[in-house]
Image (spheres, rainbow, N blue to C red):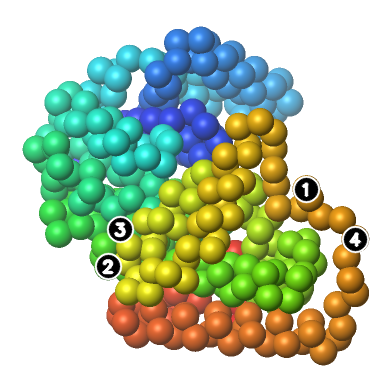
Amino acid sequence: MNEIKNIGIIGSGKMGSDIFNYLSDFSFNLIWFTRNPDHKVVLRNTYQKKIKRQLKHGIINQEIFDFRNKYRITNDLIELSDCDLILESVIEELDVKSELFHELDKIIKPSCVLASNSSSILPSELCENVQRKNRILGLHFFYPLAFKNVVEIISSEYTDEISLEKAKLFLDDIKRFYIEQKEQSAFILNRILLQLQLVAFGFIKEIGLKYSQLDTIAKKTVTEFGLFEMMDQVGHNTMHNAIMNYSRKDPDKRKYEPLLKELQHRTLSEKKSTYKFYDSETEMFEVSGEMENYIQETLRFMANKYIKEYSENYQINLFSLKKALVEFCGIML
């Protein structure tokens, strides 16, 4: 099996940048791609300032500096032609990702593994215009990488064992805990969290709680971050697209509609100004201890219900799933 030495990273947003910065601490030859020529210059200057500071303060030595200074940042896709692994992390839109994979398929070497960091688009959906379907899989990292030590490996019916083993060895090399998923169980961590977000949104509408109040209760109960605060951080358009994709895997699609409408409303509003979940909150009524306990118990019950259900339905090791959830969002039950 060929060793992974040359790694291409496509995407210079929050997630792509985080992947590049994390992998720069290892001994891979990195090539970072952005389509924007001006952004390429900014990324290069920012990175060189970073490693120069590290050298100056003794965080790295001259040998490491010289090695990392050879990392390439490019806006020419052909420079990724000799990569052993390419990690894609561009906008969460199928057409954009599909076209990118089609372009890559024409230039990469036969042994290169193409991995998508998508949080909702299946590997098989990226195979339509690609010859080497067996080399495509999902490697879903979670932001920020430094604090979320879990990756979802997602394989399609086309993914071969060699590509899968390469992905596992790569994740072992970079010290990442991972869980394996087929497409039926893909993105299981986000899908479990989404069930709690749907319950929480129901409390908002039925009881009249404010989003910040519900988030405070949730953080005492199951997650280390607010359920709606998390949606603001990910972005409402990204959340809307992901939930639409997740809903297609669920026979009960109607339960997603209220939250989808809310996110769509906020996405349209964002064209004029930021419209986060806490922004419009005014006077709040006091939440009784009884009501808070009821919400906490409901969230705990639903978390346990879906963890058990998904583990059994998709034959995922329960211990691994619980460990992954702790790493992802702090769920400890």
Horizontal and vertical percent for residue 165? 23, 56
Q: Which mark is residue 154?
A: 3
Horizontal and vertical percent for residue 98? 25, 37
Q: Residue furthest left?
A: 131
Lower position in the chain sequence, tag 2 or tag 4: 2
Q: Which mark is residue 184?
A: 2
Q: Please give the name of the residue rendered at 28% of the width and 30% of the height, measured from the top-left corner.
A: 100
Q: Which mark is residue 322?
A: none
Question: Distance from label 1 to label 3 (Cα)?
Answer: 36 Å
Which residue is more in the foreground, 293 or 262? Answer: 262
Question: Distance from label 2 to label 1 (Cα)?
Answer: 37 Å
Question: Distance from label 1 to label 4 (Cα)?
Answer: 12 Å
Give the total number of marks visible in the rendering: 4
Q: Nearer the viewer, mark 2 or mark 4?
A: 4
Q: Are marks 2 and 3 in contact (CB under 8 Å)?
A: no
| SS for dot 3 | strand
Disc 2 marks which amino acid? Answer: Gln
Q: Please give the name of the residue rendered at 33% of the width and 14% of the height, measured from the top-left corner.
A: 76
Disc 3 marks which amino acid? Answer: Ile
Lower position in the chain sequence, tag 2 or tag 1: 2
The residue at which mark 1 appears reads as: 279
Lower position in the chain sequence, tag 2 or tag 3: 3
Estimate how packed mark 4 is, as few (under 14), some (14 to 19) or many (20 or more) residues with alpha carbons within 10 Å.
Answer: few
Estimate how packed mark 3 is, as few (under 14), some (14 to 19) or many (20 or more) residues with alpha carbons within 10 Å.
Answer: many
The vertical placement of 268 against 207, above or below, is above
| SS for dot 4 | loop
The residue at which mark 4 appears reads as: 283
